[in-house]
Image (cartoon, rainbow, N blue to C red):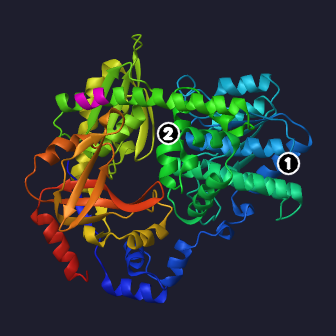
Amino acid sequence: MRREWRIIPHDGLRVENLAKTASLPPVVAQLLVSRGIYDSEAAERFLDTKLKGLRDPQELPGISQATEVLVQAINNRLPIVIYGDYDCDGMTGTAILVNGLRLLNADVSYYVPNRLEDGYGLNEDAIRRLAERGKRLIVSVDCGITSVSHAELCKELDVQLVITDHHTIGDQLPDADAIVHPRLPGSSYPFGELCGAGVAFKLAWSICQHQCGGKKVSDSLRRYLMQSLALAAIGTVADVVPLLDENRILVEHGIRMLKEEPVPGLAELMRITKLDQASRLDTESISFTLAPRLNAAGRLGQAQLAIELLTIEAGDRATQLADYIHQLNVQRDSLQRSVYLAANKQAKEEFDIDNDAAFVLAGVGWHQGVIGVVAGRLAEKYAKPVIVISLDASGKPEAVGSGRVGGTNINLYDALSECEERLVRFGGHAAAAGITILENQLEGFREDFCEAVSRQWVEKEVVPQINIDAEATLGQLTLEVVRQMETLAPFGAGNPRPILCCREVELDEPARKMGSGERHLTVKLRQGSKVIRAVAFGAADWCDELNEINSSIEIAYRPVINEFRGYRNVEIHLVDWRRPSESLSEELSVNQKNGG
């Protein structure tokens, strides 16, 4: 399904006023206005990413009580276990607390459930095993906020429980010894979008302050906290929380520390991936290189090795772990590609690509660790909700599935609620969810789910869109202009890299496939006398269609600065393209009349 291009109206007077009052280049002012930032004070808050902008950790709801519990446990040498989640956010948050507590001479270990065997969050069997091993305090990271029964079990076993989380809070809070959460009921913390690693960082910071008797910490603890910023940045980017407010600061300085002084295991992983040779790092360095490798360990049931990598001292073991996790990612990539190809083939053969409201795809033995990613890729590709289900290869009746909505405003959770009688269980939120289903219910569920989504398409008048900041010719993309755009970084959720569009673009050379498995596309484009290289990641299927076109095209793209062997030039990442259409001309003319 082709997305509708929505070009954000250009308010010339607001742009001119912001550029003047905030002393900003016009292109930066225009991009800020398109993000709803209209005055110089708001622009300064957005662009200022100084560390002093991080709020005092004591302001975070529940942190004082959690700090007291942990400090007492440290001083009394109680065995503490950090119980983390198996995704990148949970693993980095776990590593932050483990590294800090070790530095403070705590009796600390870590536990992470096996994604394939234990499932998400606190696990009663695991809690019992930890208690049997003498653990007296469990600290959850990136999970636990809905674990009411697990908190009761901890009380029965005389094990203290501190919950640190950022997920949606249920109707009842667990009866824990302390809960740290940015949106805790009754609190007024001004920024509720910290990820699990961000919450863990704030708790670590609070403990360090307490142990040093004030706001200023010792040199060794300050070095630890600065290194922890890199871990918090990885968790923040990987968990796709909005890169606004404190998250911008964590990521900006975390990326700098990633370049300057990463923890030993990350340094080894960066060496293997050659990030250590990059002249600069950015959010893409995390989302395309580091996070996938750490997540691969979790997806393949080896999350404990990723945490070991993030907490180990320099040496042969760090090198071996980094190499092993790198190879796990190769394995994960192969599994993911295999499932993607099979699921995409099924979508094309069994569904009406353009007209069906959603896809429910299922295959025997599809690896549970990658079905969520595959669902996400297909949902983005086809701009509609997709659920990918792994049928058990041994014939067990229960199957596990994962769903994504692909950037539409379809509410996945609501659609699943309408099919509840078809499911063993389900959970998640509007954009992502997991299900367990009996195989004999699959066909009925497929029909019910597609009908539920279809009603939302009609009722909400949902139209998949690409929000475009402005029209800009290829000739306008000078290094200086793109450098000015980069001042809005770090880019990510809530602050996407700017998307521009232009018309009357032609292929200067035929498009060709590239990359591992020829999944990506590269092409040289020409507009007038300007020729520029374009890359489209994961869009190799555009190749033949582009090469068959004999006329000009319209493109939506993100401009980037490419650095290679010290040479910097502008290239573009294709977001979408289409044949010349009246709709774009009409959209542009309307925007121009509105002040563009």
- Where residue 513 sits in the image (x, y, percent)? 26, 40
Q: Residue at x 73, y 52 (%)?
A: 203
Closer mark to the observer between disc 1 and disc 2? 2
Considering only order in the chain, which callout, 2 or 1, is on the residue closer to the N terminus?
A: 1
Q: Which residue is mark 2?
A: 292
- Contact between labelled residues 2 and 1, with CB atoms less than 8 Å apart: no
Q: In the shown orientation, is residue 522 left or right of residue 282?
A: left
Q: Is residue 334 visible?
A: yes
Q: Residue at x 64, y 30 (%)?
A: 321
* Stretch of the chain drawn in magenta: 341-345
Residue count near mark 1 (Cα–Cα under 10 Å), binned few <14, some 14–19, many ≥20 = some
- Where residue 179 sits in the image (x, y, percent)? 70, 49
The image shows residue 180, relative to residue 129, as above or below, that is below
Name the element at disc 1. Answer: helix
Q: Which residue is mark 1?
A: 71
Name the element at disc 2. Answer: helix
Q: Residue at x 35, y 71 (%)?
A: 478
